[in-house]
Amino acid sequence: MSDGIFRRKPIESAADAAGGQRLARTLSWPHLVALGVGAIVGTGILTLIGVGADKAGPAVILSFGIAGLICACAALAYAEMATMIPTSGSAYTYSYTVIGEVIAWVVGWSLILEYTLVVSAVAVGWSGYAAPLLQSYLGVPMTLMQGPELGGIVNLPAIGIIAVVAGMLILGTKESATVNAVLVLVKIVALVVFVAVALPYFDAANFTPFSPFGFPKSMGADGVERGVMAAAAIIFFAFYGFDAIATAAEETKNPARDLKIGIVGSMLICIVIYIAVAAAAVGAIGYTRFANSPEPLALILRELGQPGAAKYLAASAVIALPTVILAFFYGQSRIFFVMARDRLLPSGLAKVSSRGAPVRITLFTAVLVAVLAGFVPLGELAALANAGTLVAFIAVATCMLIMRRRAPDMARAYRTPLAWVVGPIAILGCAYLFFSLPQRTQLWFFGWNVVGLILYFLFVARRTRTA
């Protein structure tokens, strides 16, 4: 390993670091596809479609298309890098191997932000569907099921579901993946039912005017940033999740085959689902009637006079949204684990149980995300999580292009088609979406990374040089 903050880590040494703490290889490609679909299809389509409609109107469908295209390009870059470097850590590991330690720290620090906030945001989104059911059937007061932004005290359902998912991951990776696969099927069936019920009410008049707030981000009279790209920058949250698959590389039985199937396959499945659901939702009723609703799809069904279907969708969301929490919680714990194994975080966190599961880091992650889910609004969580993800996607696409130049003949189980077109689209598209985020979000993100770099130069760099 070369000296200095830009030293690169040989990939073959990653799994041998920190006393040889290794994760058990228990996953195959069906587990990975289910993990990806479980992560991607979730809060974004079930709850954030209302947020996107408020920002873009009927053109929210175009916002979905743009975000999906950019994510698809990033997914192709991920697939190539994951099969070249089949170890845990995702964008953090690729950056450490290809670019250098300080960039890896920034990417890892951004991934910590992404995964922590995504788990918290999805838990809050899940609570939006669970709270009405808990109040109706169990009589739980709403003040104990909503955060302060909705007039409540603490979001107890969000905290509770995080505890349940943490327990599943501690039990074992394969067992968690199997439960996840079953719940993903429940979620897909629910969305198919929504499309089947809503499509007969399709009215083209609901798409007029198609883009009432224009294409680029602009500030509305009410102080809210709107436009197709402003919506795309938030809806982007609905598409990522395939990167959680890359964090599973070290636990995959046949990484060369399974990773590319999991990443590319899950993205293709989800793009089809999203286009169908978004078109059915916007076509069924005027977007203003479900904009910013915490449960927009269930609301649409009730507005259409289908209360039974609405209850079924809400119940399915309560049952199946935890698949998103599980996928991102899994990814977060693995990012923490690898950074600890590389001594960029306290190495004591990189201990695994006799079943090959990182129990300490899972418990630490659970406490962190539970606090955020209990007290922070969903919109703030989603926007800030997107910032971290966009930086990670830019890093992965950049790593792919660098390796195409540096090691063109290196073995690749998957090669991204038209890499010099796909890579720049991912990089420039993610950069554009980043600057389409609310300015406050950008400032918070830059502040987060300033703090991260201070910590790196004060504590981390000295420790890794002595490793």
Image (tube, grey):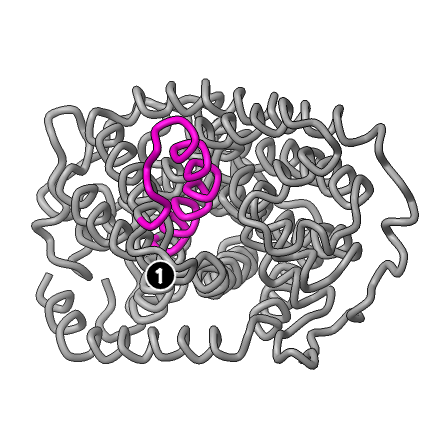
Q: Is residue 169 magenta?
A: no
Q: Which residue is at the front of the view, 137 or 309?
A: 137
Residue 440 is at least partly visible in this image: yes
Q: Quadrant of residue 57?
A: bottom right
Q: How many marks?
A: 1
Q: Quadrant of the C terminus?
A: bottom left
Position of 15 with respect to 67 (left or right) is: left
Q: Position of residue 340 (x, y in %)?
A: 18, 53
Question: SS at mark 1?
Answer: helix
- Specify the amino acid type for callout 1: Pro
Position of 67 with respect to 186 (left or right) is: right
Q: Position of residue 449 (x, y in %)?
A: 34, 74
Disc 1: which residue:
148
Q: Quadrant of the N terminus?
A: bottom left
Q: Position of residue 233 (x, y in %)?
A: 61, 63
Q: Quadrant of residue 432?
A: bottom right
Residue 405 is at least partly visible in this image: no
Q: Position of residue 113 (x, y in %)?
A: 35, 61
Q: Is residue 129 magenta?
A: yes
Q: At x 76% / y 31%, what residue is drawn?
A: 198
Task: From this view, report whether residue 305 is shown above or below residue 288.
Answer: above
Task: From this view, report whether residue 193 is shown above or below residue 300.
Answer: above
Q: At x 79% / y 50%, what residue is drawn?
A: 286
Q: At x 69% / y 81%, what residue is drawn?
A: 221
Q: Residues within 10 Å of mark 1 (few under 14, many from 20)?
A: some
Magenta-drawn segment: 116-143
The kind of secondary structure the magenta stretch mainly shows is helix
Q: At x 29% / y 40%, what residue is drawn?
A: 162
Q: Quadrant of residue 438?
A: bottom right
